[in-house]
Image (cartoon, rainbow, N blue to C red):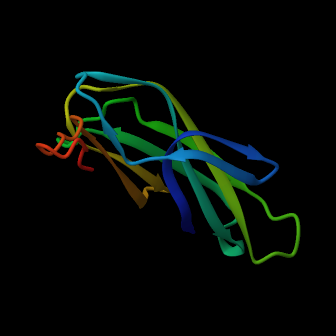
Amino acid sequence: MKLEIFTLCESAADYGGKLCILGGFDRIHSADVPLVLPRCSVVARLRVHRIEEGDHKLRMTIADEDGKSIVPGVEAQVSVRFLQELNSATVNLILQVNGLKLERHGEYTIDLAVDGIHQGSLPLYFSPPPQAQPGSGQATV
C-alpha cells in the first residue's frame, strides 16, 4: 500500500473516484489564541495492490507538539475489492473536521496509519502574523 496524496485543505470531495481538493495549506497565521478553524479537511489517496485486497483498518490523529491529541482519533475500516483485472486500485479518504481548536502557537501534526503501520505525517504550523519590516511597508513570509 502506498500513500499517493496526503494533505490538509479547506475542502475536498470525491466525485466517482475523482478527488477534488481545494485550498491546500500547512500554516496558519493569527494573533488570536486559541483559534478555532470552522472547517477543514484531511485528504488521503492510497494505492492498493491486488495482493492487499481485503479489509484494512485506518487510524488518523491530530496532535499538538507535545504529542497530545487535540481531537479524538478517527478509526475506520476500508474494504478493498477488485472488480476488474487491474493490478492496483485507489482509495480516496476525506475527513471533514469542524471546529478544530488550536490552543496555542506551535507545530501540530496529522498522522495516518493503516493496519497499525504509519503511512504519513503532515505538519500544521500555527504562528502569529509575520511582522512588517521597518520602513518596507511589507510583511515577511
Does residue 7 sit above or below 88 in this rendering?
above
Residue at figure coordinates x 38%, y 48% from the top left = 26
Res. 67 image quadrant = top left
Indicate the position of residue 79 as horizontal and vertical percent values.
70, 52
Q: State the image coordinates of residue 124 (x, y, percent, origin top left).
A: 33, 45
Q: Residue at x 82, y 49 (%)?
A: 16
Residue 33 x %, y %: 22, 22
Instruction: State which quarter of the image contains the N terminus.
Output: bottom right
The image shows residue 93 at horizontal and vertical percentages of: 62, 48
- In the image, taking residue 12 as reference, residue 115 lies left or right, namely left
Question: Is residue 112 shown above or below 87?
Answer: above
Horizontal placement of 45 versus 68: left or right?
A: right
Q: Residue at x 23, y 49 (%)?
A: 140
Q: Residue at x 51, y 39 (%)?
A: 75
Residue projecting furthest to the right: 84
Report which quarter residue 47 is drawn in: bottom right
Q: Is residue 39 above or below residue 19?
A: above
The residue lying toward the viewer, choosing from 113 and 134, is: 134
Taking depth in this image into account, of 124 and 121 the one nearest to the observer is 124
Front-most of residues 72 and 51: 72
